[in-house]
Image: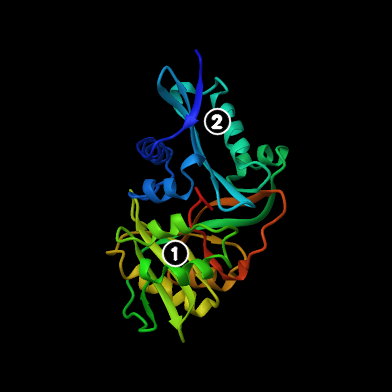
Amino acid sequence: MNPEIRQLSLVEVAELLLWAKAEGWNPGLDDAEPFHAADPAGFLGCFVNGRMAAGISAVTSGPDFGFIGLYICHPDFRGQRLGKRVWDAGIAHLGDRTIGLDGVPAQQDNYRSMGFMPVYRTWRYSGRFKPNSINPNTGPIDAATLSLVEDFDRRYYPGARKAFLTRWLDERRIARGVIRDGKLVGYGVLRKCHEGYKIGPLFSETEADASLIFIALCAESNGEIVSIDVPEGVGGFIAYLADIAFEKGFETARMYRGEFPRIDMRGVFGVTTLELG
């Protein structure tokens, strides 16, 4: 056995996302292209005799921040330390940047041993919600408003991610926002997943606008289950989700190695994805 570490093609990123589906992570149906666009050099695989044995995303967002996700070893190759090889390659790709990840409770001690420190917990809330009406202040967000989104997004996400956002806001997903006096004050994105839909991100200056955007996105879900990963600090929004019978599911912890990013967590009502942060 002579393992090879190399970058993944777009097709291989799609394969890694199918592994994520098999693990029960329920990725979006069209995640591969925007994920890969975020940092084409940041998707790495360990190959054995031409077959992908393990994969990881180690995506850079500018010179100061990167994020680890999609860390999976295929069941046929577990127990051979091939995952460690691809982990090391991902960490090396991110260099001296602050590195973030979302860790499940069972793995948090392991991540602590590698220098990652927990900052806050995130819970996945899921449910069905069919609004009676949509507030007229919410409207479509798309590539035409990309410049507004880029500036706004940077307040709530630790790095610049223009290539990702350009594709995240395309016609395969539904984005809604609130613009007042030419200024974006909140936006969110809904995407179809293998099971139901997910909302992410949901960033807003206020809880009131976050709720309006959430309602507008749920109206596009065709009555299917909607999930959103919510940081613990937005207690009022969590209470709202409980009021509409959304149920709390699994928990992760946002963990960082290096200097904690300076972002306004008061406006993060739903993280973008657990794979890319």
Toward the bottom, the furthest residue is 181
Q: How far is mark 2 from mark 1, CA to CA?
A: 37 Å
In the image, 106 versus 269, the foreground residue is 269
Where is residue 27? Give x, y as percent. Answer: 40, 48
- The residue sitting at 50% across, 12% down in the picture is 1
Disc 1: which residue: 246
In this rendering, position of residue 220 left or right of residue 83: left
The amino acid sitting under disc 2 is Val
Tell me the mark number nearer the camera, choosing from 2 and 1. Answer: 2
Residue 43, compared with residue 62, is above or below; it is above
In this rendering, position of residue 54 left or right of residue 67: left
Disc 1 crowd, CA 10 A, few/some/many (<14, 14-19, 20+): many
The reply to whether residue 142 is visible in this rendering is: no
Toward the left, the furthest residue is 222
- The residue sitting at 62% across, 39% down in the picture is 107
The amino acid sitting under disc 1 is Phe
Label total for image: 2
Where is residue 123? Give x, y as percent. Answer: 54, 57
Toward the top, the furthest residue is 1
**Mark earlier in primary sequence (2, 1):** 2
Where is residue 222? Give x, y as percent. Answer: 27, 64
In this rendering, position of residue 85 left or right of residue 125: right
Disc 2: which residue: 86
Q: Quadrant of residue 86?
A: top right
Where is residue 87? Give x, y as percent. Answer: 58, 33
In the image, 176 versus 208, the foreground residue is 176
- The residue sitting at 61% across, 40% down in the picture is 106
- The residue sitting at 39% across, 36% down in the picture is 9
Q: Secondary structure at mark 2?
A: helix
